[in-house]
Amino acid sequence: MDRILMRRMGVASASGETPAGIPDLPDLPDRQAVEAWQMERLRETLQHAATHSPYYAARLKGMDAGFFRTPADLAMLPRSTADDIRNFGADMVCVSQDEIARVVTLDTSGTSGRPKRIFFGQDDLWRTTEFFTTGMQAVACAGDTVMALLPDERPSSVGRLLAQSVINMGARPLSGSMTRGAEALAVQAMEEWVNVVVGSPMHLRAFALGWKSLGYPAGLIHTVLLCWDAIPEAVVDLLHDILGCRVLSHWGMTETGLGGALACAEGRGMHLRETDLLVEVADPETGSLVPDGTWGEIVVTTLCRTAMPLVRYRTGDYGRILCGPCPCGSPLRRMDRTPGRLQDDIVLPAGGTGSVTVTDIGTDTGNGIGTEGTLRLIDLDEALLPLYGLAEYEAGWHEPPGYTTKNTAGHSAPELVEECVVPVLSIELFHAAGVAPDVLRAEAAQRLLASPVLGSLLTQGGVLLDMSCTPAKDMSMNHAKRRIRRLAASSLSETVPESRS
Ligand SMILES: [Zn+2]
């Protein structure tokens, strides 16, 4: 990514490039220069948006783009939300219809029931391919075969853009579909000499378990790249153990132009794609910036995006910027792996008192955001995903009659505000072939009780556990982000997945 930075900033490499194409460190711009360059792009973006989009013309009325000199000045700008995109997305577009190369339609959830549409121009897509191509050079080598477990049916879908990037960097792309089953996929990977696999944590985990069940050895796959969803430490450990390979992480979403941050080559967090994004971590309530090292909500402003710029867009993802410069020498800031999304937090009443536990995202415990009384998928993941006999699981919770919910931090986070009945956490375990359901259920219960956050919730009666165990089914390629589903008391079917393509 330093290469893209140098190219964009017009910094020439005086001493040339190393054979791997990595610029020599002394040629890299310093942090101050990167920030100044970003602020210049920000001023251009604001000017472009205010001039060409009806939404931003109204939103940024009276604003002087020249005012914005330091990242702290961004606090003067209003934040935008997913609902803004749902309601005013078309008005955010700055180019004519025929300049739109791709429209990605996301979920239809949210208060308005409208879908979220993100518009990209050809140059926006090109910059994503540029990021993927450069990023993949840190993941794979020329001559490698890269298997992607990603949707690739549509033109310019993430799988297709990645495949093009893999070709650009001299490697061979291969598409893998989870619908074939994990073992079939592992056989395909073995026969095709795959050495790099890219996919969501749950898909990669299933792939690794398939690999193990076939008795394939560790060390044949040299790198896996995890993307799409929160990345549990348990999955990273399992992949290390089974595949014996490097495990790299990526963060991004459609709104960030797919790419957002990629693992540092030295494993010190993920370097932000600061050539195209100005990333802030903000207090979800107030919108003010939090210091580096503190958890908050990731807020992004797109730089260089022509079709549909986003200004201070609330991603809904937890994140934190890692302190200090990276030992690898890159001037790009780094972020930690995101443990999930704010709106998926389920805040339960504190142990029988009826008072609500406020989510304290500033507290650094365990996965960084853990707070007693808050039900989070990442905590379930860390407890359950180390179990080899578990193919996957689904979790939901019943909202008992008498509870009301309210929004927190502008998101539709379910929060129980009245003491009444103890909520029920339903977990459906899917066991691998040959695994005794009772044994798996007992192991799972033991691990949940031993989990720091969930254990105290369960032992103090903050939540009741209802666990079932059924045979595993083949996974779908639907890359909906996983969440603890909110179940109607009478039905177990309510869920609105966020489909991505
Ligand atoms: Zn680094």
Image (cartoon, helix red, strand yellow):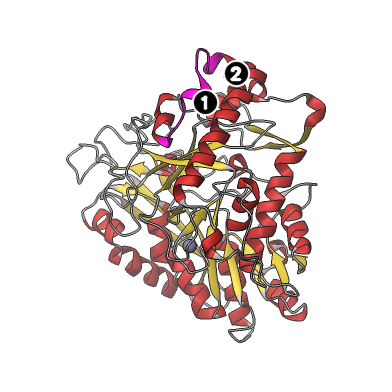
* Residue 461 left/right relative to 438: left
Give the farthest residue toward the front.
14
Neighbor class of circle 1 (other Cα within 10 Å; few <14, some 14-19, many 20+) is few
Instruction: Give the answer, above or below, for where 454 lies relative to 256.
Output: below
Ligand 1 lies under 8 Å from the Cβ of mark 2 = no
Residue 150: percent from left, percent from top: 68, 57
Which residue sits at x=68%, y=32%? Answer: 306
Sequence-wise first label, 1 or 2: 2
Name the residue nearer the viewer: 373 or 425: 373
Instruction: Please tell me whether mark 2 sits on a helix, a strand or a loop.
Output: helix
Pair 1/2: label in front: 2
Q: CA distance from mark 1 to mark 2?
A: 20 Å
Look at the image and give the residue range highlighted in magenta: 58-71
Can see residue 302? yes
Q: Which residue is mark 1?
A: 111
Q: How many marks?
A: 2
Percent coordinates x, y for residue 230 in the rendering: 49, 54
Residue 154 at x, y = what percent?
A: 79, 47
Indicate the quadrant where residue 48 lies: top right
Q: Amino acid at mark 1?
A: Thr
Q: Residue at x 57, y 79 (%)?
A: 243
- Which residue is tagged 2? 55
Q: Position of residue 343 (x, y in %)?
A: 43, 39
Residue lying at 20% horizontally and 36% vertically, measured from the top left? 355
Image side of residue 426 versus residue 462, left or right: right
Q: Is residue 12 magenta?
A: no
Relative to 56, say whether 188 is above or below. below
Q: Residue at x 58, y 46 (%)?
A: 275
Residue 16 versus residue 46 in the image, above or below: below
